[in-house]
Image (cartoon, rainbow, N blue to C red):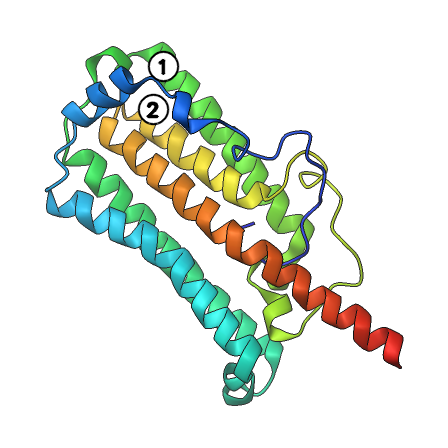
Amino acid sequence: MLAGGALPSHLDCCGGLSNLDYSKVDSSAMTLLLGYVKMTDSTFAAAVLCIAFNPLFWNVVARWEHKTRVLSRVCGSPYTACYCLGAVILLLNFIRSHCFTEAMRSQPKLEGLDCLSVYCAGLAVLGIGFLFVISSFLALGFIGTFLGDYFGILKEEKVTSFPFNVMDNPMYWGSTACYLGWSIMHASPAGLLLTAVVAVSYMIAMLYEGPFTEEIYQQKRKAAKNK
């Protein structure tokens, strides 16, 4: 999911990309990829910073809100506060996508990927990514997508409809697929490397969000039993 939100499905048939063994990635391919990327380029550095900053920002702010309820008090209600945070996250994601695209444009293309068939493949990957992102948003709603449970707005039950019945965290993996498809369409080694950074940043976010969200719902169940 884009920024945490509702309890994920616990079906592990796919698990997104988290079950892949990255230690077996062909090192020669990675070396070739790095040979095309100017990592000291300012636009590339800006893209990396945006990618790393976004999940860090929404996790820190959401946990701070869960602990203090300051945003809810300032905004007048947890719903208004959640909508405000969601708007900020959307703006940050727009900036991230802009920096990502500018970094690709400033770097050389990989000639072997610069053809119609590869472009179409990238377009297909992009389409699949959008499918998972949009369907996740529709299943969760705005509040569920943008960390509503950290604001005390809890769902009555887990979301188990598509795409949560296919994989865990489909919003995150769908977003990653969008960046992957966009990079392939542009035949961009820099884009492919940045996509890997996106995937790693989301995987780190999931390590923190999953247990914390589960703890929130455990507290809800305990409170219900004590009534």
Q: Nearer the viewer, residue 177 or 198?
A: 198
Hey, what amino acid is under mark 2? Ile
Query: Do the numbered discs 2 and 1 sit on residues whose CB atoms are within 8 Å?
Result: yes
Residue, x 50% and y 88% (percent of image)?
74
- Lateral position of residue 126 relative to residue 96, left or right: right
Residue that badge 2 annotates: 184
Residue 118: image tag: 1
Residue, x 57% and y 34% (percent of image)?
16
- Alpha-carbon neighbours of circle 1 within 10 Å: few (<14), some, or many (≥20)? some
Residue 35: x percent and y percent? 15, 24
Above/below status of 49 relative to 75: above
Image quadrant in which the C terminus is located: bottom right
- Lateral position of residue 39 relative to residue 179, left or right: left
Residue, x 30% and y 38% (percent of image)?
194
Residue 25: x percent and y percent? 37, 21
Hey, what amino acid is under mark 1? Val
Residue, x 34% and y 24% (percent of image)?
184
Above/below status of 2 relative to 10: below
Mark 2 secondary-structure assignment: helix
Residue 182: x percent and y percent? 36, 31
Q: Earlier in the sequence, mark 2 or mark 1?
A: 1
